[in-house]
Image: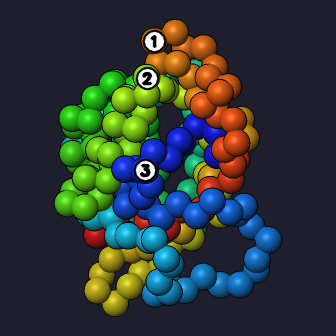
């Protein structure tokens, strides 16, 4: 994991469970009802049916790119959840690059415990004067729906081509990236 340092206070980013294990290698179906040690629930504010015109605009700098695979499943409901998931990830990065935890996008896509964890995560970057550059690929994104109406998105991130930078100079911070793992498994809950 190169671009997402895990300060103790931000271990569960936006209430995503980060499992520092390589993604892939298992063909087993993931049961969204299974409890994962350390996993917490995120609460997303908007419903997938809200219009795109109401959403905040998120633009990452040219040196940072998120690529989201598996965006279209053929199921409009799942596709809307995947779009919200991508926007939530981009909202976190938008806050890092803006240098503040008080952004329209974070307030729109996260609430309650998820918003609190997102704030802690972004502060982990800001307090250490970090940003990131490169490309992060999000793949194997799977959506399931719970009986309570919530959606669960489990997905992998490949951060081999992303790295931490000094937020002031933009230079790579190889010391901060040392020892991090390039693959991360996320488990999110959207309501």
Q: Residue at x 53, y 60 (%)?
A: 18
Numbered disc 1: secondary structure: loop
Q: Position of residue 61 (x, y in %)?
A: 49, 22
| Left or right for 55, reference 63 | left
Q: Nearer the viewer, mark 2 or mark 3?
A: 3
- Residues packed near mark 1 inside 10 Å, few (<14), some (14 to 19) or many (20 plus): few
Disc 3 and disc 1 in contact, CB within 8 angstroms: no
* Residue furthest out toward the bottom: 147
Q: Is residue 12 visible?
A: yes
| Left or right for 96, reference 173 | left
Disc 2 and disc 3 in contact, CB within 8 angstroms: no
Q: Position of residue 19 (x, y in %)?
A: 58, 64
* Residue furthest out toward the top: 169
Q: Which residue is mark 2?
A: 129
Numbered disc 2: secondary structure: loop
- Residues packed near mark 2 inside 10 Å, few (<14), some (14 to 19) or many (20 plus): some
Q: Nearer the viewer, residue 93 or 128?
A: 128
Numbered disc 3: secondary structure: helix
Q: Residue at x 23, y 48 (%)?
A: 108
User: Which is nearer the N-term, disc 3 or disc 1?
Assistant: 3
Q: Nearer the viewer, residue 61 or 116?
A: 116
User: Which is nearer the N-term, disc 2 or disc 3?
Assistant: 3
* Residue furthest out toward the right: 25
Q: Nearer the viewer, mark 3 or mark 1?
A: 3
Q: Residue at x 65, y 84 (%)?
A: 29
Disc 1 and disc 2 in contact, CB within 8 angstroms: yes
Q: Which residue is mark 1?
A: 168
Q: Nearer the viewer, residue 108 or 181?
A: 181
Q: Which mark, residue 153?
A: none
Q: Which residue is mark 3?
A: 8
Q: Residue at x 26, y 35 (%)?
A: 101
């Amino acid at each position: 994991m190169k671009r997402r340092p895990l300060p103790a206070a931000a271990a569960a980013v936006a209430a995503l469970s980060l499992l520092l294990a390589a993604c892939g290698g298992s063909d087993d179906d993931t049961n969204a009802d299974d409890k994962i040690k350390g996993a917490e629930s995120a609460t997303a504010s908007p419903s997938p049916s809200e219009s795109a015109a109401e959403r905040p605009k998120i633009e990452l700098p040219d040196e940072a790119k998120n690529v989201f695979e598996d965006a279209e499943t053929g199921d409009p409901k799942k596709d809307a959840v995947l779009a919200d998931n991508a926007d939530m990830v981009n909202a976190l990065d938008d806050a890092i690059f803006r240098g503040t935890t008080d952004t329209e996008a974070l307030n729109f896509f996260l609430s309650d415990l998820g918003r609190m964890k997102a704030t802690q995560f972004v502060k982990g970057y800001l307090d250490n004067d970090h940003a990131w550059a490169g490309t992060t690929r999000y793949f194997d994104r799977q959506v399931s729906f719970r009986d309570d109406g919530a959606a669960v998105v489990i997905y992998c991130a490949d951060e081999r081509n992303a790295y931490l930078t000094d937020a002031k100079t933009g230079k790579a911070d190889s010391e901060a990236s040392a020892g991090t793992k390039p693959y991360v498994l996320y488990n999110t809950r959207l309501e």
